[in-house]
Image (spheres, grey):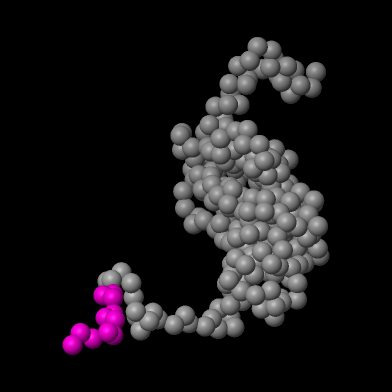
Amino acid sequence: MVSRTPSAAPRSEDQPSRADKAPRRRLSVDERREQLIAVALELFSRRPPEEVSIDDIAAAAGASRPLVYHYFPGKQAIYEESLRRAGQELTARFEEPAEGPLSERLLRVMGRYLDFVDSHGPGFAALLRGGSVAASPGTNAVIDEVRRAAQEQILLHLALPGASPGVRRTVRAWIANAEISSLDWLGERAVPREELQLQLVQELVAALAVTASREPELAAEFAAFFADERPDGPCAGLVRDLSGLLAVDGIADALGHLASGS
């Protein structure tokens, strides 16, 4: 007699049985919170914060809206925490071993800085330009802390016995210039990234040289900086560019006249 019980279809090796499927591990409280922050940071990096909703964050994390609210009271709170994490990452990019010529160290630092700007564009551009509705005392405090940390890292590279108010002011102004220049580049891409990277380093060297002209102690330190530079480095390129400027008809004579005071 032929059995009427249908035989089971052979299981493909590519088709796992129920027993083969491992149960999804539940995330711990800390793991879930970290996941929500990471997802939110990714969304805020690609879009201005006002265009990201709690529902967007929940969907990207594979979580429910109430679950997001369980960890954060609202979008502003998760935005500030995401920004804080991004700020920690950006601060770390200013760290560089104090080895080799100063301008080459700064060139590597600015390369990492521009990498960050490039990968975290719209959300942070909106905030730094002051046009974001998500700006708050909390977000402003995070940005100010990043700026202070960047300033201290640059001063460490300068390795001055004691940075004068003039030097601190010069470095702080250069950081603001780097923000403006890099965000303009992010919006327009008018120059190659490597060109902006080099330009920012040379602008800091030039600004410090102007400060050194007013501070004899800093001028003595600058002699050591220049002695360590290499002929193919950013500082040497700046010197060649300035020398070329002096070769333009009339400029050397005009500057000589101004320097003589007559």
Q: Residue at x 67, y 17 (%)?
A: 252
Kindly report the secondary structure that dominates the magenta region of the rendered protein: loop
Closer to the camera in the image, 158 or 258: 158
Residue 104 shows in the view: yes
Looking at the rendered image, the quarter that the N terminus falls into is bottom left
- Residue 168 against residue 31 in the figure, above or below: above
Q: Residue at x 59, y 83 (%)?
A: 29
- Residue 26 against residue 14 in the figure, above or below: below
Closer to the camera in the image, 163 or 6: 6
- Residue 197 against residue 56 in the figure, above or below: above
Closer to the camera in the image, 180 or 214: 180
Drawn side of residue 216 relative to residue 131, left or right:
left
Residue 165 locus on image (x, y percent): 75, 52
Report if residue 103 lies within the magenta region: no
Drawn side of residue 114 relative to residue 256, left or right:
left
How many numbered markers are drawn?
A: 0
Drawn side of residue 9 relative to residue 119, left or right:
left
Q: Residue furthest left?
A: 1
Report if residue 9 lies within the magenta region: yes
- Residue 192 against residue 5 in the figure, above or below: above
Residue 3 locus on image (x, y percent): 23, 86
Query: Can you tell which quarter of the image residue 134 is in?
Result: bottom right
The magenta segment is 1-11
Residue 221 locus on image (x, y percent): 60, 46
Query: Can you tell which quarter of the image residue 212 is in?
Result: top right
Residue 262 locus on image (x, y percent): 80, 18
Q: Residue furthest top?
A: 249
Residue 150 shows in the view: no
Query: Can you tell which quarter of the image residue 37 is in?
Result: bottom right
Q: Residue at x 66, y 78 (%)?
A: 67
